[in-house]
Amino acid sequence: MSESLKIYYYILVFIGMLYAFYKVGINKTSFLIVMIFWAGLFEYLGEIIDPIVTNLYKILIVIIAISFTWLKILHNKTKYDNKLNFIFILFSISFWVSYLLYGGDIITMLSQYFYKFSFVFILYHYLKEIEFDRQKGLYIGKIILTILFIQILLSLIKLGFIGPTNDIGIVEKIVGSMSAGGAGLAVVIPVIALIFYWVLKEGQLKRKDWYIVISFIVIAFASAKRQPIVFFPLILFFLISFAKKRIKLLSILKYMPIVIILFIVGAKLNPSFNPENKVWGSFDIDFISEYGLRYYFGESDISSLSSSGFDTGIGRGAAIFYFYQPDRLNLNNVKEILFGKGRYYVAVAQGGRFTAFASNYGIFQSGLMGEAGSLLYSFGYLGTLLLMILAFVIINKTINKHIVAIIFFYYLWDFLFYYNQVVYSSQSAVIVLCTIFLAQINSSTNHRLSNSKQ
C-alpha cells in the first residue's frame, strides 16, 4: 500500500470512528471503548507527524480510563474483586521491585505498567457493573459489535487497496482501526470476537448469525495471519461441542461441515499453508502439520520433539522449555530467576525486538519466540506467574466454566506461543471482559429460571 493510499485509508478510518459514535451515541462508556479501538489511527499519526502523538494517546487513554474508574476500584462489590485486587497488588510490587533493581527511563516504565500490563485491571473495574446490569451489558455488547463490523469493513477496504497478491504480509501491521504497527491483533481479535458473539447470542445462532461469525475471519485474512486458520475453526468446534452443558451429537454433526470448510478454505487462501505458496493453492494436511511444527519448534517431524537431541532454542515453542531451563534465558542467579533482568531494555528494544532477536540478549534462541520467554527474561518467574494468575482470575470470573475453559485455553496458547494479547491487549481485553460478564449474567439468569421451574 503506497503512502498516498495509506492517507486515504486512514481518512476512512477516521470516518469509521465518527460512524461508530453516530451508531452508539457519545457518552463515557462509548467514548472510552471507541478510542481504545482506534489506537491505530494515533499510531499512524505518530508515524507521519511525531512519535509523541502516539505516546500522548497512550497517556491520555490511561488517564481517561482511571478518571472513569478509580471510585469503582475503591468500591468493590464482591469478594472476587478483592481477590483480583490482591493479585494485581502482588504483580505491581514485583514489577516495581524489578524496576528498582535494574532501572530505566521512568516514563517508559510507567507506560509499560499502566498501558501494557495494568489496563485490563482498570477495564475490569470499569466494566464489572455489567454483571449486575444486563441492559448496560447489552449496550456495551452493541458498541463492540458495531466496532467489529467497522473492522471487517476496513479490512475489506484494505484488501481492495492492496489488490490480489501473495505479498499481502507487507502491510500486515495495519489491522482495521486497531493497529498500525503490530499485526498481533489480527490473530486474536477474530477468535475472541467469535467467542463474544456466541455468548452474546447465548449459543443460539440463526442463519444470519453464521454469516456474521464467519465474517470475523476477514480481519485475519487482511493481514495474512496463519494461526486463525487453525484456531478459528477449532474454537468454533469447542463452542459447538463443549460450551453448552449438554453435548448434543446431532448439533456437532450438523455444524461440523462448517468447521471443516472454514479450515480448508483458510488453508487454501493463505500461501504459507499450501505447497504452491499461493492464494488458493491446494489443501495438504501433511504440509500444514509439518509447517506448523517447523514454525513452532523448528522440527517437521513430531517424533523429534521428544528426542534427547531436540534443540529447545528454535521457534515460538521454545518458551515452553524455558520454564524449566532458566539458564537458557540467561537467568543465572536467584535474583534474576525471581525478578528477571529488567523490562526497560526489552521495552525499548535495545537489542531489537526480543521475540525475534532474543539471541542479541545473550539467549540460546533462533527465530521468533513466544511472549512467555520475553516476560520470563523481563520479570522473572515471580512477575510472569503473577501475570498468568491475574489473567486466569479475570477469565474465571464467570460461573460458566465451559466458556472459562475455552478462553483460558486460547489465552494460554497466546501466552506461550504468541504475543500475550488475548488479555493484555486493550482491544481484546474489552471484548474478553464483556464476554465474561455477559456469560455470568446468562448463567445466573438460566440458573434462576431452572430453579423457578422446579
Image (spheres, rainbow, N blue to C red):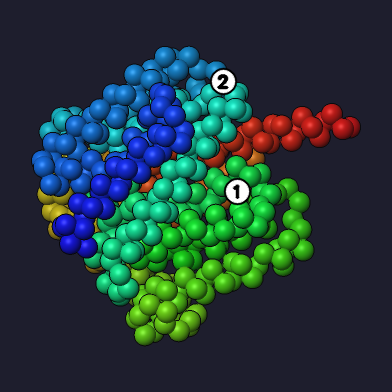
Q: Secondary structure at mark 2?
A: loop
Q: Within 10 angstroms of label 2, few (less than 14), some, or many (20 or more) residues?
A: few
Rendered location of residue 228, percent (x, y): 45, 62
From the viewer's perspective, is 449 left or right of 377? right
Q: Secondary structure at mark 1?
A: helix
Q: Residue at x 37, y 57 (%)?
A: 155
> Residue 240, located in which quarter of the rendered image?
bottom right
Quadrant of the frame with the N terminus: bottom left
Residue position marked by numbered label 1 in the rendering? 198
Q: Amino acid at mark 1?
A: Trp
Quadrant of the frame with the C terminus: top right
84 or 61, which is in the foreground? 61
Q: Residue at x 74, y 56 (%)?
A: 247
> Residue 445, located in which quarter of the rendered image?
top right
Q: Which numbered circle lies on residue 443? A: none
Rendered location of residue 136, percent (x, y): 55, 27
Q: Residue at x 45, y 74 (%)?
A: 267
68 or 12, which is in the foreground? 12
Tally of numbered discs: 2
From the viewer's perspective, is 84 left or right of 56? right
Task: Tell whether label 1 touches label 2 (CB within 8 Å).
Answer: no
Residue found farthest to the right: 454
- The answer for how far apart the CA atoms under marks 2 and 1 are is 26 Å
Q: Amino acid at mark 2?
A: Thr
102 or 105, which is in the foreground? 105
> Residue 40, located in which quarter of the rendered image?
top left
13 or 54, which is in the foreground? 13
Residue 2 seen in the figure = yes
Residue position marked by numbered label 2 in the rendering? 78
Number of the front mark, 2 or 1: 1
Rendered location of residue 355, percent (x, y): 25, 56
